[in-house]
Amino acid sequence: MMDDRSSKLILVPILAVLFVMIGYQYICPAGSNSCHFKTEEKLRGVSLLSSPYQDSDDFYRDQDLEDDSPPKLPSKFNFTERDLDRHVEFNIKGDDVIVFLHIQKTGGTTFGRHLVRNIRLEQPCDCKPGQKKCTCHRPGKEESWLFSRFSTGWSCGLHADWTELTNCVPVIMDKKEAQRNKRNFYYITMLRDPVSRYLSEWKHVQRGATWKTALHMCDGRSPTQDELPTCYSGDDWSGVTLTEFMNCPSNLANNRQVRMLADLSLVGCYNLSSMNESQRNHILLGSAMSNLKNMAFYGLTEFQRKTQYLFERTFSLRFISAFTQINSTRAANVDLSELVRRRIEELNFLDVQLYEYAKDLFLQRFQFTRQREHQEVRLKRREERRWLREQREQGRPWPTKHRGGGNRGGRGGGGGSEKETDSDFPTTTEDYTSQVAHW
């Protein structure tokens, strides 16, 4: 028989193990992704459900995605589950085309480069040094799956808006590629905080940008000089002060995001005399909100990781490297008084309302997608435990390899694409005319 001292010596390590196990349950509850111990590791490589979103293939973890989240507030808008669920069956080998609506100073240049250089594809875009455009063809076909500045150029005009693109893209694609089947167009865009975007545009114009070659096509024609007068005389508006920039009533920087996302034909295009200002603003804002909500995808400049996450889940495509959040911008370095900030918000009061709507919907879509993904992970683990229990009951040995590896590249993915450096990509400017087509 063991004496009391021997019993205590045996009992101590047992209690220690139990304490660790209980503590682990509190720190890493079932279904949590916050622990570094993967289910697949604990199950010696067993994975019943193959998924394109393996934990080990993500660049970000839960904390990365939550760090940039604002405090959760009740939503002002009544979004339905259909509004929140934006997964599309994008078939890169079929007839589907992603159309990128590039609004000035929303981080669209960076995002556009991600589209042509950073997506893991079976046939990556061919981006040659010194060329402004990349060739983004479907696997085994001479057909483009992407309509954007860096793939097809400014084929519908410089920074074409929703009104221009929806009328122009099908025509341009039919001219470039003879195709019998009807294409499916998936529109995407990026938005930015209106004050930051406005300041960024001012700084850009101050350095000499004009975008004066933009067509602004609507109802088959460009606006007249009377309908859209310029804010400056001469070649550009270099050196403009912020006060001068704000004082031009025809400045297209004002409410640019609403105007570029709305159907301008609903308000007589650029003819301001077609209806009163209040009615025009109401129609423009409602149209922009509706078009934005019905787009396949949009991202927010202020939430780069969430933008990457939602794009990947929407299209079942994976990026090669993670998006980077850059908060030190020219706009961020502008020292504004509260009076000037309020003036900018007043000039962009439609954009302010649109961005509030867009941010609310964006964050709700993110939460909806994350919760659904967590539920799928919990279901997967439950099925794995059930399968292992059946194997033990039947006395079968555990397999040494995954039963399904999953296509980590998503529907159109293929892997094998090497990341280029920024020096390999041609320097671009906003105001080149060689790529602008008149349609």
Image (tube, helix red, strand yellow):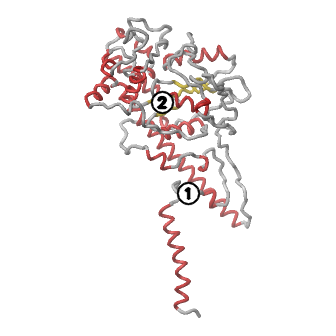
Tell which tag, 1 or 2, sits nearer the viewer: 2
Q: For the C terminus, which image quadrant?
A: top right
Going by the numbered disc 1, the residue's amino acid type is His
Q: Residue at x 47, y 16 (%)?
A: 211
- For the residue carrying disc 2, how many other residues have a C-alpha within 10 Å: few (<14), some (14-19), or many (20+)? some
> Badges 1 and 2: C-beta atoms under 8 Å apart?
no
Q: Position of residue 199 (x, y in %)?
A: 37, 26
As displayed, is residue 174 above or below residue 75?
A: above
N-terminal of the pair, mark 1 or mark 2, is 1
In this figure, which residue is indicated by the disc labeled 2? Answer: 107
Image coordinates for residue 138, horizontal then vertical, percent:
69, 28
Q: Quadrant of residue 287?
A: top left
Q: In this rendering, would 138 be left or right of 288? A: right
Q: What's under tag 2, amino acid-wise?
A: Gly
10 Å crowding of disc 1: few (<14), some (14-19), many (20+) = few
Q: Look at the picture and state if 226 lies above or below 259.
A: above
The foreground one among 302 and 24 is 302
Q: Nearer the viewer, residue 69 or 50?
A: 69
The percent position of residue 257, horizontal first and vertical second, equals 42, 24
The residue sitting at 57% across, 49% down in the picture is: 376
Task: In the rendered view, tell whether residue 205 sits above or below residue 322.
Answer: above
Relative to 133, 242 lies left or right: left
Above/below status of 365 relative to 27? above
Left or right, 406 with respect to 37, comes to right
Where is residue 68? Give x, y as percent: 43, 43
Q: Foreground: 305 or 129?
A: 129
As drawn, the label of residue 188 is none
How far, Cα to Cα, is label 1 from label 2? 33 Å
Q: Identify the mark at residue 36; answer none if there is no mark.
A: 1
Provide the secondary structure element on which disc 1 rests.
loop
User: Which corner quadrant of the image does residue 390 belong to?
Assistant: bottom right
